[in-house]
Image (cartoon, grey):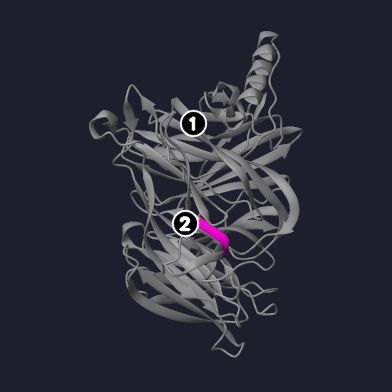
Amino acid sequence: MKNRLRPVIHIGLFFAVLVMRVTLATAQLQQSDRIEIPVNPFNTEHFEVFPLGEDGLLSVVRNNEYSGGRSEQWKFVKYDVALKAIWVTTYQVDRRYIPVMAYKGIDFGYWLFAEPDTDRFLFLQLNFMDGSTDVFKGNLLAGVDVHQFKVIGSKALVSGYYRSRPVVLVHSLFDHTTKVLPGLFEKNTELNNVDINEVDGYINVITYAYKKRNCFFEIKTFNYDGKLLKKTSLSDPKNSLISGQIVPLNADDSYLIGNYSVGCTPFSQGLYVTHIQDNEPEEPQFIEFSELQNFFNFMKPKRRQRMLDRIGKRKSLGKENRFRYRLLVHELIQTKDEIVLVAEVYYPNQKASNPVITSGMSRPYISRYMEGYRYTHAIICGFDRNGKFKWDNCITIKDLTSYDLQEMVQITPVDDYFILAYPQDGSIHTEVISRDKIVVESEKFKIEPKSETEKVLNSEDAYLSPWYGQYFLAYGMQRLGTSLVGGREVFYINKLTYKTENIGKVEDSENDGKPR
């Protein structure tokens, strides 16, 4: 079986503390339900999973088994929260088109296809409610390197680079017209993010520019029709903003939260928050990593103490600290009372070809040659609704590498806790925090097969997504069997439940007399 085609995916710790004859109970990650989709060993297949919250999930399977090479079949299956199929629909994609990116909206999913070396694009819209599809074709821009794809209303936003300069295209899915947003096609400028405000119908384009040895961070706000409404420029004589996410308060009032560097470098020095009112930003609040209570907790105790001593000594001498951390900042989590920032610290690894499995709201399909990455830890920081920094925490990531730079640590709020989890080598690592306190230490759980008579012989491409409440979705490839030879290969989707009821509860060990 060495020459068979390989499928591609697109996307424990027992802890007991006895203090004054009292035992602290721990939480559990449990495998609730599981789907196993057999993999055809003689055909190339691509798999994806899109979590839909309490509405269930969507799985996508691509193959060309029944098309004779003229088209590729895309099979969409929606499952409920018990992993029972609700509907199934298929669509045949002309082989002239290649998938570029996908975007998950609230009620619809969208897939962007391009015909190479032309300006012809195709948009596939899928209704999550009943599985109905609509197809829209249009002419955009030949040779554009797409980096982001989103949809607001009936407008598709395709952003990327054309001749090494940033460009954002707004394409109407109904009248098939395309407009280029003005004021962005400049040299020495990078796209940081294209943020959409569906409530007010605004498009915020955030750029990072290097001009005359200075770095400029700029937000251009456009209306639904692509008209420039306002422009906000942010710069600091000492610090440079690397990334930023907008937290809107109203049409003219918002916060911007992200990370910053010293000088125009990609290395983060810390976090910042700034208030923007009527296009005018206030003085940013810069929070250096050394000011975070738990940032260096990923280090071993002796190394951490040496680092803190070095930082303290430099400050006592009036010298500034310089850090060389790269941050992958997640989309902000907003609750009723606070704003939570999650970011993973990573380092470039050896060069490799990245795989086609991805996750998140906006997904690329075109594989690029880029460096692999090694993750060391993730930081979690909380701000109140007024933008004031309140707390921080840290989760250590041991020996985790990825060929593609993507969000590995997933977080979901449950009651007064945050459950953090990431996949590694066929297992799920978890930790539970309550703001700046760790309430359940790191635990490791294996992803088991559906049948008790089988065992996992090999696991690869394991990914994790928060679903709803205390539930996660784990998915990937496994080879299952009863012995080390042979076996069958499946694409699995696991529903995982994190039980939080016993967190913080205590039991009197003297009452039952049982060892813990």
**Residue farthest along the bottom direction in this orientation:** 68
Kindly identify which numbered label has been placed on residue 7.
Answer: none
Q: Residue 502's x, y, as percent? A: 30, 39
Amino acid of disc 2: Asp
Amino acid of disc 1: Asn
Principal SS element in the magenta part? strand
Q: Residues within 10 Å of mark 2 (few under 14, many from 20)?
A: some
The residue under label 2 is: 225
**In the image: residue 119, left or right of residue 254:** right
Quarter occupied by the C terminus? top left
Q: Quadrant of residue 376?
A: top right
CA gap between label 1 and label 2 equals 42 Å
Q: Say if mark 1 contacts mark 2, CB within 8 Å.
A: no
Q: Residue 28's x, y, as percent? A: 37, 46
Q: Residues within 10 Å of mark 1 (few under 14, many from 20)?
A: many
User: Is residue 250 among the parts visible in the rendering?
Assistant: no
Q: Residue 388's x, y, as percent? A: 43, 25
SS label for mark 1? strand
Q: Residue at x 64, y 75 (%)?
A: 115
Tell me which label, 1 or 2, sits earlier in the chain: 2
The stretch of residues the image draws in magenta is 458-463
Q: Residue at x 41, y 76 (%)?
A: 133
Kindly identify which numbered label has been placed on residue 393.
Answer: 1
* Relative depth, front residue between 287 and 392: 392
Q: Residue 119's x, y, as percent? A: 64, 72
Whether the magenta-drawn stretch holds residue 183 is answered as: no
Q: Is residue 290 above or below residue 119?
A: above
Q: Is residue 45 above or below residue 324?
A: below
SS label for mark 2? loop
Q: Is residue 423 above or below residue 415?
A: below
Whether the magenta-drawn stretch holds residue 460 is answered as: yes
